[in-house]
Image (cartoon, helix red, strand yellow):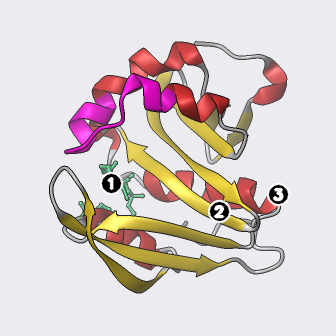
Amino acid sequence: MSEPEGKMSEKDGLTYVPLAKAHVPVLLPIEHEAYPDPWTQGMFLQEIRNGASHFFLAFEGEALVAYGGFWLLIDEIHITKLTVAPRHRRRGLGAALMGYLEAHGQQVGGTTVRLEVRESNTAARTLYARGGFQEIGIRNKYYAATGENAVVMVKHLLPHDPGHAHR
Ligand SMILES: CC(C)(COP(=O)(O)OP(=O)(O)OC[C@H]1O[C@@H](n2cnc3c(N)ncnc32)[C@H](O)[C@@H]1OP(=O)(O)O)[C@@H](O)C(=O)NCCC(=O)NCCS
């Protein structure tokens, strides 16, 4: 699963690698375990083609421990995915990955981070609130598969925020 050296970056003991086609079969089992409405192979491949998408895998040694990404929409970092492999949860990896996405998003011109999260997803809502996100609204029945509401959360990044606010 190695990638060209120049594309990788290391932070907090994790190696971040941009999503590539070969990763998708490795992601799918984690994705299916993590979500009631998992992304399909085609959706992950679309992220590779989408010029607005910045999508990364986090490796700890050889192990894939987390993945996530965002779309840069003008100056908005719109988080599209944040997933930690089940057996690696509650070790700070979700917070570390969000910190990486924020820092990278800021480097490419983002000033505000925005996301939707399931109303029932206490783990993610707590992580985001602890990381400085504020809940700004509800989207009714946003998730078609389950009819669940989404909570919209926003964080305004400081001009030189190094993205470490979660640690
Ligand atoms: C949400 C998710 C990414 C969190 O990843 P994680 O690596 O376990 O999170 P962290 O270890 O960085 O947790 C940071 C803080 O968030 C909060 N938190 C995380 N998981 C929690 C849980 N299950 N219950 C309550 N609080 C939780 C805690 O405050 C935690 O700090 P603590 O461990 O010191 O108490 C992970 O549970 C996951 O992948 N879930 C399935 C996919 C998903 O729902 N993604 C979010 C979509 S919007």
What crowding class fits label 2: few (fewer than 14 Cα within 10 Å), some (14-19), or many (20 or more)? many
Amino acid found under the numbered disc labelled 2 = Ile
**In the image, residue 39 lies in the stretch drawn in magenta:** yes
Quarter the N terminus occupies? top right
Q: Which residue is mark 2?
A: 77
Along the viewing direction, whichever of 4 and 72 lies nearer the viewer:
72
* Residue 73 drawn at (x, y percent): 69, 60
- Place of residue 53 in the rendered image (x, y in percent of width and height, measured from the top left): 65, 43
Kindly identify which residue carries mark 3.
107
Which stretch is magenta?
30-44
Q: Are marks 3 and 2 in contact (CB under 8 Å)?
A: no
Q: What secondary structure is the stretch in magenta mostly built from?
A: helix
Up-down: is 92 above or below 57?
Answer: below
Disc 1 designates what residue? 90
Q: Compare marks 1 and 3 and give the one earlier in the sequence.
A: 1
Which secondary structure, mark 3? Answer: helix
Please say if the residues under marks 1 and 2 sit with CB atoms less than 8 Å apart: no
For the residue carrying disc 3, how many other residues have a C-alpha within 10 Å: few (<14), some (14-19), or many (20+)? few
**Residue 60 visible, this angle:** no
Mark sitting earlier along the chain (1/2) = 2
Q: Amino acid at mark 1?
A: Arg
Alpha carbon distance from label 3 to label 2: 11 Å
Please, what secondary structure does the residue beneath circle 1 have? Answer: loop
Q: Quadrant of the C terminus?
A: bottom right
Residue nearest the viewer, comparing 151 with 94 = 151
Q: Nearer the viewer, mark 3 or mark 2?
A: 2
How far, Cα to Cα, is label 1 from label 3?
A: 28 Å
Q: Is mark 1 within 8 Å of ligand 1?
A: yes
Using the rendered view, name the quadrant where residue 108 is placed. bottom right
Dot 3 or dot 2: first in sequence order is 2
Give me the residue at 74% from left, 30% from top: 8
Residue 111 circle label: none
